[in-house]
Amino acid sequence: MSRPIDHSESPMPTSGHLHICVMSRAVVQHQTGGGMELLAEMLRHGMVERGHRVTTITTPHPQGMTSARDEWGETLFVGTGAPGVYTRDWWRASMDALLRVHAQGHVDVLAGQGKAAYAYLGARRRLPVVDRIPTTVITHSTIISDLRAQLAQLRRQPKAVARWAPRGVAYLLDDRRRLPLADAITALTEEHAQSLRRWFSLDPARVTVIPNGVDLAALTEGALQRASVRQRLGADGETRVIMVLARLTPGKGQQHLLEALARPEMQPFRRSVRVVLVGDGPARDGLVSQSTALGLRDSVVFVGRVPHGEVPGLLAAADLVVLPSISEGMSLSLLESMASGRAVIASNIPAIASVVEDGVTGVLVPVAQPAGLARALAGLLANPQRAAQLGAQAHAYVAAHFDQRAMVAAYEGVFL
């Protein structure tokens, strides 16, 4: 397991205040519950606390607002189309908004999450020098890892892989054109950084590893809510709560968890288990139908989207947390689960394995194999002392290496 860079020192800025423009497909107002919106919010808060100014540009607001302002800066909702979704109109509108903000109050740094800054990068060389803003691309995963995950699913879901392939090829070509144009690129893990350097011919000096970080204080305070949240979930003292915090999409693998629950290995625990799926997305109806078909409907609770402020209480209510993803970056929900002292069971893919050491800070299982997941679940349900030990070790590891304040300081170091 690769070890993250230790950013335990978090000096306050010494090189003057910056005006940072954050471009992100999703922010907290979109309520997608994804890591992208959480990181955008962490950057807003963290950079302002460190003396900088932040303006955020994102996709349309769910209720049609065009802007919002608070103590952490202004957020502009631009373009047309669905909230949280890139469209051609959004690319144009985001460019116009960026140049307008730059003209009104000089932008020192553009920080684009994922592909959000790609339109600007493509046009930057044609702009006047005064409009050429230094740009950092914050990557959460690579199309290469997604491709490998899809190929692993080829035998089980050939039609789904075939549907994904044209989009995946387009993403790959887009990354190859745009990433080399960025002044700096951040990666979540060293393996992620190596993949970027290798597949996109990037100058190693421009790629910086910055692991995700979590708010340790908020997660610790969540423990006080365990009893009340469990009561709300209908879980009594004998009930074992298994939780997944992720969007309901095929790539997050909730369908494999449901299959695992229906396997013989889980038969002894069937009546004492409550599965809580936190999040929403296009796979919800299919998962509801699957849980009914497998005879699990009374054991599965679909919580839907929740404000991020409720996550610490939900995690405190859990006994085990599962992340059965097919493809994943460095999941914030995984880090938060570990920081909360929960035992985690997660797919053995590079970004997860960079955080979870099998048998030490959690349990890793083969991707998309319900039998292996069922055995891991049954093993920890039968041995709560072992689960508690894994949870304690996970908390200590995340507290030492993945503090949100250190993450913000590392991004500031890239921006300065």
Image (cartoon, rainbow, N blue to C red):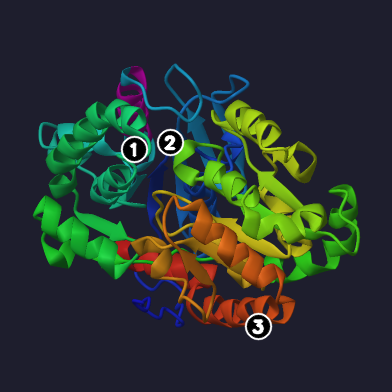
Which residue is labeled 1 in the image?
A: 116
2 or 3: mark nearer the eye: 3
Amino acid type, residue under disc 2 in the picture: Arg
Neighbour tally class for label 1: few under 14, some 14-19, many 20 plus, Cα within 10 Å: many
Neighbour tally class for label 3: few under 14, some 14-19, many 20 plus, Cα within 10 Å: some
Judge whether 409 appears above or below 300 on screen. Answer: below
Q: Distance between the residues labelled 2 and 3?
A: 38 Å
25 vs 359, nearest the viewer? 359
> Image point 54% across, 50% down: which residue?
38
Question: Is disc 2 in contact with disc 1, using a CB cutoff of under 8 Å?
Answer: yes
Which residue is labeled 3 in the image?
A: 389
278 to the left or right of 25: right
Judge whether 279 appears above or below 217 on screen. Answer: above
245 vs 176, nearest the viewer? 245
Quadrant showing the N terminus: bottom left
Q: What stretch is highlighted in magenta?
A: 89-101
